Amino acid sequence: MQRPNSASASLLLAFALSSCLFILTLAQKQPTGGSDLGGGIVTKTNVEHFAKISLDAEEMFTLTQSSSYNDASNIYLAGKNSIQYDRSGNALPNKRSLSSLSTGAADGKFDGEVPFVFQMYGLAGGAGHTYENYESFAMYADAFVNDALKEQKDALGPEAAVALNVWMYAAHVLTIAVEDCALESSGVNLDIIGRDEALGGSADALEIFIAFWIGYNQAPGSDDGSSPYAMAERAATLFGTSGPNGEAKANTAIKSLFNEAQQVLSFPNACRSGSDTVGQLWGILHRTVSQMQVPLVQQLIDALVREDQDRISLYAKAVVPQMSSCAASTYRRLKEDLLDRTYDPTKFVDVLGDLQSSYDCLGFSCDDVGAYKTDRVAQCAELPINFPMAEYSPTSHVHLVSCY
């Protein structure tokens, strides 16, 4: 067999390299088509790479259970399963990480967004604090997760990454859906903005939101997973708040609100000047965030009953700051009892009463939260329909309105 000369060998090598690069490029293109997220949610665009952030949390859970905290920390910081793509659909070298979902707050990514604003306001102590005070809390979620991993507190780190990082980022993307619609209705070209998540406007942002909430390969009604959806399923089991279909009522409500928002955006004049799309989406956003808070409150009550100080700290950090939008005295007491000092179990009845009194303001009901383990903690009672509001007695249940 005749050996190829050097020129031929160079040509063959160049051809082989170019072929490999071509194949590699094809392999790294963003997939097209919809994504089946489970439970009847099939998106029009491919959001699988967003949903796969739940696989990072899942691997972190597994690693912390075997005391491999350094490996869990590496996944948290660098990412592993969630590919990022540029605006042309090409894969980027860095993976999306659970850490990055939170650290963007330090660069002002969430500025002006209602859930995050109340989070900062509440962590800072409410009224009387300056903007600089709020800024110092921007990394609250990332700091909590890193500390939990560093101190090797079993699975607290990945649990916090879901309840704090993914939860707030999902609320952030949901807010983008409304913001993009408002910009479109004002005649702004969204391509000029160049967002790194929702490049196609409100409809895409909604689908990215539901991908973060449900996670990857999530079976409907199952708590087997590491997404906010699975967290809500676990909480519903504790509080008896699963619906007839076996799914947590909060998850069913969130999916229903997602479908409602999609329908609003399907009209020909959606997000156009003169339409009321923004107002409708704004209302859906707040109802959705309210339902997103239900499993956090349920998990907090569970931690209080079990006197699990680590998880009291976690879920109090997620819940109590949001209550800064409610009665100031109630918020201050909860902040002092759950955030500023170690929880005193003898104050359980008082703490529970303060939590329950805030449900209306946060936009959900006693029935939404349910009774803990049937008879361990009874379900609270709703206000009567005609309960006076500033000397006005309503004829329908209008108390259950979010304070946002």
Image: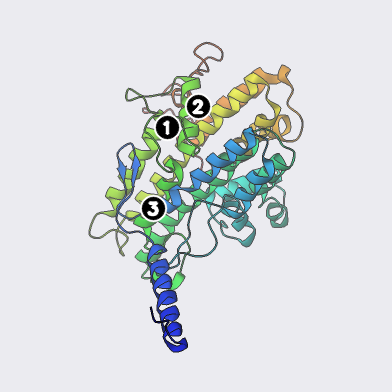
- Evaluate if marks 2 and 1 touch, with contact meaning CB atoms under 8 Å apart: yes
Q: Foreground mark, 2 or 1?
A: 2
Q: Amino acid at mark 3?
A: Val
Query: In the structure shown, which secondary structural element does the residue marked by tag 1 occupy?
Result: helix
**Residue annotated with mark 2:** 235
- Is residue 323 something that shows in the picture? no
Residue 209 lies, in percent from the top left, at 43, 49
- Mark toward the start of the polypeptide (2 vs 1): 2
Residue 307 lies, in percent from the top left, at 68, 21
Q: CA distance from mark 2 to mark 3?
A: 26 Å
Query: In the structure shown, which secondary structural element does the residue marked by tag 2 occupy?
Result: helix
Q: Residue furthest left?
A: 268
* Label 3 environment density (alpha carbons within 10 Å; few <14, some 14–19, many ≥20): many
Asked where in the image residue 306 lies, by quadrant, the reply is top right
Q: Foreground mark, 2 or 3?
A: 3
Q: Amino acid at mark 1?
A: Ala
The residue at 53%/64% (across/down) is 93
Q: CA distance from mark 2 to mark 1?
A: 10 Å
Asked where in the image residue 63 lies, by quadrant, the reply is top right
Location of the N terminus by quadrant is bottom left
**Residue annotated with mark 1:** 250
The residue at 46%/48% (across/down) is 52
Left/right placement of residue 337 relative to residue 257 reads right
- Evaluate if marks 2 and 3 touch, with contact meaning CB atoms under 8 Å apart: no
Residue 293 lies, in percent from the top left, at 51, 36
Q: CA distance from mark 1 to mark 3?
A: 22 Å
Q: Foreground mark, 1 or 3?
A: 3
**Residue annotated with mark 3:** 47
Residue 337 lies, in percent from the top left, at 72, 29
The residue at 42%/41% (across/down) is 214
